[in-house]
DNA sequence: CAAATGCATGTTATCGATACCACATCAATA
DNA sequence: TATTGATGTGGTATCGATAACATGCATTTG
C-alpha cells in the first residue's frame, strides 16, 4: 500500500532537483551549485549535471529557491498606463537594465488612480520584490506606510516629490513647462492658451499646468486661457475638442500649449481640419516628444524627456541598493534632463 | 548564548503567519484560512486575525504559499513590443481580465526575435506560471519543446499558426489585408504599392504582405509594387522613406498600403510635406487602427483589429483551462474580428 | 614528512505557507 | 436518547530549493 517509489521515471510530475541529482549521481546541493553562476563545481561534474538537466527537461523552480534564499529576484514597477509610449519607454528602460542582473520585472499600471496604485503595491508586495519603482510622488497614506515598512529600496520617478519616500529619478515638470513658455515668449507669442486637466490624478499634468501659470506671471503676460477636458490621460480627440473650446472663448489666442503631445496632436489636426494655418494662425506645442510629434506635419514643438533613461537610471539605482551593502547613501535625487525641441508648429 | 525567543516583538524581521497566529491566539492554519476567500472561519475569529494582521503590518508571502499549494498564481504573456499600442492594448486586455481572478501577469517583450522569446519563456518558466499567452506562432524548436513539455495551457494570439501548440485566439492577417485590397479595388484603385518588410521576424507582417500579393493576383490587377525598409517594427520615419522610394520607382502608383498605421502615418505626412494631395494624388491605407489613424488629417483608412479583445479572450480561455477540470476541450481556435475602416485617405 | 591549506562535494536544517486529516462542538433528525 | 452531519479549528508533514556547516581528499609548505 506504500506510496510507490517516486524515482520511477514514469512519474508524470515535473522533474525536481532530486531527479536531476539522482540521474547525475550527485547531491541536490551540487546540482544547485552547478546551475548557479559563479559557484565552484568541477567541470566534469557540471557537465554530467547539465546533461541530466537536459535529458529530463528540468527547469529550476525559483519559487522554491527564493523561499530558501530569501531573495525573490523580483523588482516591481508601477506606471500610470502602458498604452502611453512615454511610460512604455520607461518600462523598457527598466527591463533592459534588469536583464543582465537576473532580476525580473513585475509591471503594473494604475490608470492614473492612487487607489489602484495602493492595490497594486499590496498585490506586488505579496511577491516580496527586492525593490520597487513608482511613477510620481502621490500615494495614498496606506501605500506610503506599506512602502516605508517594506524595508526595500523605493525609487519614485518622473517628477520631484515634495516628500520623497526614498530615492528619486526625475525632473521638475513645472520648470520644464515654464521653459517651454519662455521659449515661445521669446519668439513673440503673448496670448497663451493651455490644454490640460487639474485633477489630482495626474500629478505631472498638474505640475505642468502650474509651471505654465507661473511662467506667464513671471513674464508679465496676459493671463493664460486654461481649458481642461475629461480625465487623464487626455486623448488625441479631447485635444481637438479643447482647442475648439479655447478658440471659441478666446479667438485671439496666439499659442496653445498642451499637457502632452497627444492632446497637441489632436489640437493640431483639428485646426488643420478647420482650415487654420499652424503656426501662422495659431501656434501649438506639446510635451513629451512622442514619435508622432516629430513626424506629423507640421512637426510639433515639444519638450523632450528622457523616458528611457528615467527607467534605466531608476533600475540602476535600485540594483545598487539591492546589491550594495544596504548602508547605501539613500535619499539621493537624480535629475534627468529635458529640452525644448522647436519644430514648425510654433 | 541561545538565540533569544523569536516571539519577541522587538525582532526586526518581517512578521510571518506565525506572528499573526500568536497574536490572534489561533493556529497558523486558521490565519491562512482567514486570509483566503471562501474558507470557513467564524466571524469573530476572522476579525481577531484581521486585527492582528493590521497591527503587525503583515503581508502574505505568496512565494511560500505557492510552494505549498503548488499554485503560483502567475500567468506569463509575451508580446513583441510594449511600445506598440496594439500590443499594449492586448496586454491591457489580459491584465484586466486577470484582475478579478487573483492571477498576476508576468509580461515580457521579444523585440520581434524568436531567440529572445525563447530566453523569456525559459526565464518565466522558472516561475512556474499556470498558463502562458504568446504572440504569433513562430517559435524556436527549443521553445516549442519547452511549451509542450510544461503541461500548462498555451494560447497563441494575433494570428492563426499553421501548427498551433494548444489554443489560439486570433485572426488571419492574410485575409484581413486581402479584404483591404479588395475594398480599395472596389473604389477604383488599380495600381497598388505596399510598404512592409519580408523578414521572418515579424510573421504577422509577412502574412499581411502575402495577403496583399495574393489579393492583387486574384483581382487580376497589375503586380503590386513592394518596398521594405529596415527591421520591424517599421517606424513612422521609415514609412515616410518608403513612400518616397515607391513614388520614385513607380510614379504612377495610385494607392499605397502599409503593414501598420505607423508606417502609413509616416507615409501620409511625408506626402503632405511634399505638397501631394491625399487621396487625390495618392491614396494611403494602414493596418491596426491606431489612435493616430483616426485623428490625423486626413484620417487614415485602415483595418481595425480587436487588440484589447484578443487579450481578454486569450486570458479568459487560459483561466478556463487553469480553473477547469483540465480535461477541457483544448485545441480550440477563437477567431477575433476585424473590419476595414474607411477614412479620407482613400 | 607532518601540518596546513584549498577545493569539491555531501548532510542537515530550514525558509513560510498550505494540504490533509483529525477532532471537538453543536444542532438537527430518527 | 442516540445518531448523523455540518462547522470551526488544530497538528503534522510537506512543497523544492538553498544556507551553513562538515567532510574528505589532494596539494602545498616549513
Image (spheres, coloured by chain):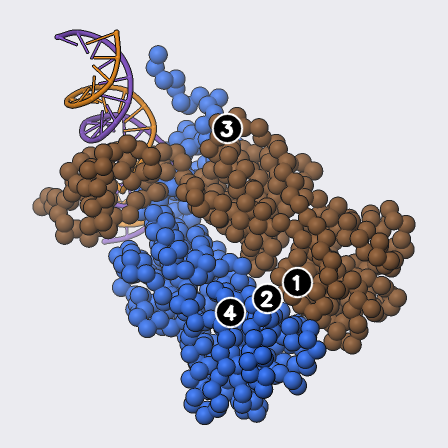
Chain colours: A blue, B brown, C orange, D purple
Q: For numbered disc 1, what is the local secondary structure?
A: helix
Q: Nearer the viewer, residue A11 or B239?
A: B239
Q: Is residue A122 above or below residue C22?
A: below
Q: Which mark is residue B294?
A: 1
Can you tell which of label 3 and label 4 is closer to the viewer? Answer: 4
**Mark 1 — on which chain does it sit?**
B
Q: Nearer the viewer, residue B41 or A70?
A: B41
**Sequence-wise first label, 1 or 3:** 1
Instruction: Determine the residue positioned at 58% across, 70% down.
Output: A241
Contact (CB < 8 A) between labels 1 and 2?
yes
Q: Which mark is residue B326?
A: 3
Instruction: Determine the residue positioned at 49% across, 37% down.
Output: B319
Q: Is residue A100 above or below residue B246?
A: above
**Mark 3 — on which chain does it sit?**
B
Measured as percent of width and height from the top left, residue B167 is found at: 60, 36
Can you tell which of label 1 and label 3 is closer to the viewer? Answer: 1
Name the image quarter holding residue B291.
bottom right
- For the residues marked 1 and 3, what is the alpha-carbon distance in whole angstroms? 43 Å
Name the image quarter holding residue D3.
top left
Q: Which mark is residue A229?
A: 4
Amino acid at each position: 500500500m506504500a506510496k510507490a517509489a517516486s524515482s520511477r521515471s514514469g512519474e508524470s510530475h515535473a522533474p525536481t532537483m532530486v531527479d536531476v541529482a539522482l540521474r547525475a549521481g550527485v547531491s541536490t546541493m551540487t546540482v544547485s551549485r552547478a546551475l548557479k553562476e559563479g559557484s565552484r563545481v568541477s567541470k566534469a561534474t557540471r557537465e554530467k549535471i547539465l546533461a541530466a538537466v537536459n535529458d529530463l527537461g528540468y527547469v529550476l523552480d525559483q519559487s522554491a529557491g527564493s523561499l530558501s534564499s530569501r531573495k525573490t529576484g523580483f523588482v516591481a514597477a508601477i506606471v500610470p498606463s502602458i498604452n502611453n509610449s512615454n511610460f512604455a519607454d520607461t518600462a523598457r528602460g527598466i527591463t533592459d537594465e534588469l536583464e543582465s542582473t537576473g532580476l525580473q520585472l513585475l509591471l503594473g499600471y494604475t490608470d492614473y488612480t492612487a487607489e489602484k496604485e495602493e492595490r497594486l503595491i499590496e498585490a506586488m508586495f505579496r511577491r516580496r520584490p527586492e525593490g520597487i519603482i513608482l511613477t510620481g510622488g502621490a500615494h495614498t497614506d496606506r501605500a506610503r506606510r506599506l512602502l516605508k515598512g517594506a524595508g526595500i529600496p523605493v525609487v519614485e520617478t518622473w517628477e520631484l516629490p515634495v516628500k520623497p519616500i526614498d530615492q528619486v529619478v526625475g525632473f521638475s515638470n513645472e520648470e520644464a513647462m515654464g521653459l517651454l513658455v519662455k521659449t515661445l515668449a521669446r519668439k513673440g507669442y503673448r496670448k497663451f492658451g493651455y490644454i490640460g486637466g487639474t485633477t489630482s490624478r495626474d500629478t505631472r499634468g498638474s505640475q505642468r499646468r502650474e509651471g505654465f501659470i507661473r511662467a506667464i506671471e513671471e513674464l508679465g503676460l496676459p493671463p493664460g486661457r486654461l481649458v481642461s477636458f475629461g480625465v487623464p490621460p487626455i486623448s488625441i480627440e479631447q485635444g481637438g475638442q479643447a482647442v475648439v473650446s479655447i478658440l471659441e472663448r478666446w479667438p485671439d489666442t496666439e499659442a496653445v500649449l498642451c499637457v502632452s503631445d497627444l492632446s497637441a496632436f489632436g489640437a493640431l489636426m483639428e485646426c488643420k481640419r478647420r482650415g487654420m494655418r499652424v503656426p501662422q494662425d495659431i501656434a501649438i506645442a506639446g510635451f513629451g516628444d512622442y514619435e508622432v510629434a516629430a513626424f506629423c506635419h507640421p512637426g510639433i514643438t515639444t519638450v523632450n524627456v528622457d523616458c528611457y533613461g528615467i527607467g534605466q537610471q531608476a533600475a540602476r539605482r535600485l540594483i545598487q541598493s539591492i546589491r550594495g551593502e544596504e548602508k547605501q547613501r539613500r535619499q539621493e535625487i537624480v535629475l534627468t534632463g529635458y529640452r525644448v525641441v522647436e519644430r514648425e508648429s510654433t
